[in-house]
Amino acid sequence: MIVVERGRAVLEVAQGDITRLDVDAIVNAANRTLLGGGGVDGAIHRAAGPELLAECRMLGGCETGEAKITKGYRLPARHVIHTVGPVWQGGEADEDRLLASCYRKSLALAAAHGLSSIAFPAISTGVYGFPPERAAPLAVGTVVETLVEYPIGRIVFCCFSDESTRLHVTALKAHAGPT
Ligand code: AR6
């Protein structure tokens, strides 16, 4: 859809179901229990199968802004990185920092496991109510900033709706050009 190169890395926006992507890791917009839910979390657990929930039970939950990794089981993706985005409370409750932290910690975990491709959903912009037009530039900007630290070759922003896709394309275009 749109592809931008930043040094060693290629960033792209794709539209569709993240559970179909063949990457080293897909990121799950989970909740603090890590025991499943609706939205993208529900879709990932359904597609990965019950073994994913069994592994998640052993993780002891996850704090907002943090990330934990599991295997991908029946998914085409080899791993799932579970992160917990902030619930939108009006913007004065550290939501921006916590959302940026989800992207940073997920990339750090992917790099620590030697992974070279990763796909993100639009964390917190569904049930958690983070305004999508604020989240998209924050997500893309954080990834572009953080990437320089890690040898990750491919980053996909996997958007579900037309609106989310448009917002991420616009945000990514702002980072096109010489690195
Ligand atoms: N592939 C890609 N993106 C998707 C998919 C999919 N299959 N399904 C939904 N989205 P949400 P949150 C988009 O609500 O706001 C869960 O119950 C969706 O359109 O999944 O972080 C958890 O257990 C939206 O743009 O996550 C938590 O309790 C984005 O994914 C809570 O929801 C995120 O929407 C987390 O809420």
Image: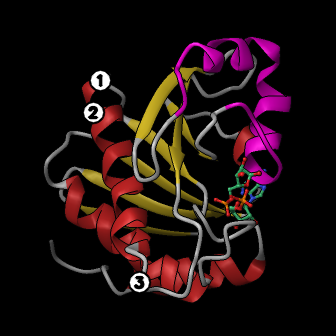
Residue at point 67%, 75% (across, down) = 129
Q: Main secondary structure of the magenta part?
A: helix
Image coords of residue 163 (percent x, y): 72, 84
* Three-letter amino acid code of the residue under disc 3: Lys
42 part of magenta stretch: yes
Residue 44 in view, yes or no: yes
Q: Which element carries disc 1, helix, strand or loop?
A: loop
Of labels 3 and 2, earlier in sequence is 2
Image coords of residue 102 (percent x, y): 41, 54
| Magenta region | 35-61
Alpha-carbon span between mark 1 and mark 2: 5 Å
- Classify residue 101 by image quadrant: bottom left
Is 82 displayed left or right of 165 in the figure? left
How many discs mark residues in the rendered view? 3
Colour mapping: secondary structure
Residue under label 2, please give it.
111
Viewer-side label of 3, 2? 2
Residue at point 29%, 23% (across, down) = 114
Dividing the image into four equal quarters, which quarter contains ligand 1?
bottom right
Of labels 1 and 3, earlier in sequence is 1
Is 96 displayed left or right of 170 in the figure? left
Residue under label 1, please give it.
114
Q: Which element carries disc 3, helix, strand or loop?
A: helix
30 part of magenta stretch: no
Mark 3 residue crowding within 10 angstroms, few (<14) / some (14–19) / many (20+): few
Q: Is residue 1 above or below residue 82?
A: below
Do the numbered discs 1 and 2 sit on residues whose CB atoms are within 8 Å? yes
Closer to us: 150 or 40: 40
Residue at point 35%, 33% (across, down) = 110
Residue under label 3, please give it.
173
* Three-letter amino acid code of the residue under disc 2: Ala
